[in-house]
Amino acid sequence: MMLSIFVLPKSQLRKANSEIALVGDSTINKAPGFTLVWSDEFNKDGFPDTTKWNFEKGFVRNSEAQWYQKENASCLDGYLVITGKKEHKKNLNYIAGSENWRTNREYIEYTSASLKQKKEFAFKYGRVIIRAKIIASQGLWPAIWTVGVSGNWPYNGECDIMEYYKGGLHANFAHGSLNPNKPVWNSVFKKMETFDNSKWDEDFHVWRLDWNKDSMEIYVDDLLLNSIKLSETHNLTNGINPFRQAHYLRLNLALGGDSGGSLSETHLPSQYLIDYVRVYQYTLNE
C-alpha cells in the first residue's frame, strides 16, 4: 500500500508558526559563545543523509510493537518524516517456541524508523536544538534522546530530551545503579493538559538541551522541564560519570511497548516530523 504524505512546505509552516520558530532561533542569538558544529536541516527530498545517520533494524527494545526499518524515514519539503504504520509481513527472525519477544512473533504487525547519529559526530557539552512536531496519542512513543559512546546501557548514560507517552512529555536522565537492569532515573513528567493550548500537538515546538561540565538542562520552547547536576551522576558500580563523555543523538517513533501502551485505538499511519537538528558547542572549551 502506498502511503500518501501531505505536509505544508517548510516555508509555509514557519510562517504559520513564526512565534515558535523564533523561540529556538532567538535562544541561540541571545547566547554568544556558541558555534554550530553539526546539523541536519533535512532540505533534500528523499532518503535521510546516510553520511550523518545510521538506522536501527528489527525488534530492538522495551517489548515495542514496531519493527524498525529505514524505509519508514524520508525527507520531504524540508522535514524528516518518520512514519509509524500497521503492516503484516513475515518475521524472518521468528523461532517457534522462543521465549524472546524479539523472535517469538511470527509476523511483523507494525513498522517505524529509528535514526542514530553516527558516532564520529558525537559531541561533549554544548547546546542541542531540535524543532519537531509530535502527535500526542495513546500508543505513540516519539523520542529525542542521547546515549554515551562508551559503556553498556545504562552505564553509558541516557538523556531523554523528549519522550511522549501516557498523556505527557517526559524529560529524563539515567545513569548506572548497582543493578545493571535498573538505572538511576531523574525524571520529570508534564501532562499535556498542563499546557495552556489544548491543541499543543498541532504545532511545532523547540526542544533544547544545555550541557556543560557542571549540569544538564532540558527545555521545550524555553520552558525548563528538568535539570541535573553532574556531581550526582556517577555510576554506582564503577564511579564513572557517563555525562562527562561524548554522546550521540537518536530520533525514533516507537509504537506500543512497555510505555507506549495499547495500539487498539491508535490511528495509523502516524507521522513524526522533525524540522531540524542542530548541535552547538562552546567557542571557548570548558
Image (tube, helix red, strand yellow):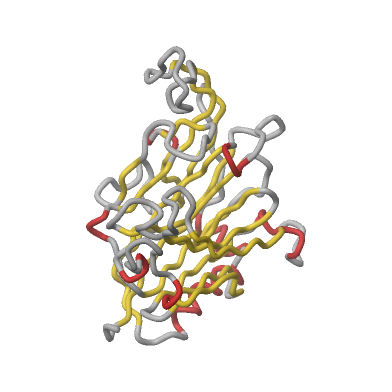
In this view, the residue farthest toward the top is 96
| Residue 65, percent from left and from top | 54, 31
Based on the displayed image, in which of its 4 quarters is residue 233 positioned? bottom left
Judge whether 264 appears above or below 241 on screen: above
Task: Name which residue lies at 43% across and 19% down.
Answer: 91
Q: Is residue 10 left or right of residue 280?
A: right
In this view, the residue farthest toward the left is 120
In this rendering, the count of numbered labels is 0
Q: Quadrant of the C terminus?
A: bottom left
| Residue 174, percent from left and from top | 47, 60
Q: Is residue 93 left or right of residue 223?
A: left
The residue lying toward the viewer, choosing from 206 and 46, is: 206
The residue lying toward the viewer, choosing from 229 and 49, is: 229
| Residue 194, percent from left and from top | 75, 64
| Residue 53, percent from left and from top | 31, 49
Task: Name which residue lies at 40% across and 81% down.
Answer: 214
Based on the displayed image, in which of its 4 quarters is residue 95 positioned? top left
Task: Name which residue lies at 34% across and 68% down.
Answer: 239
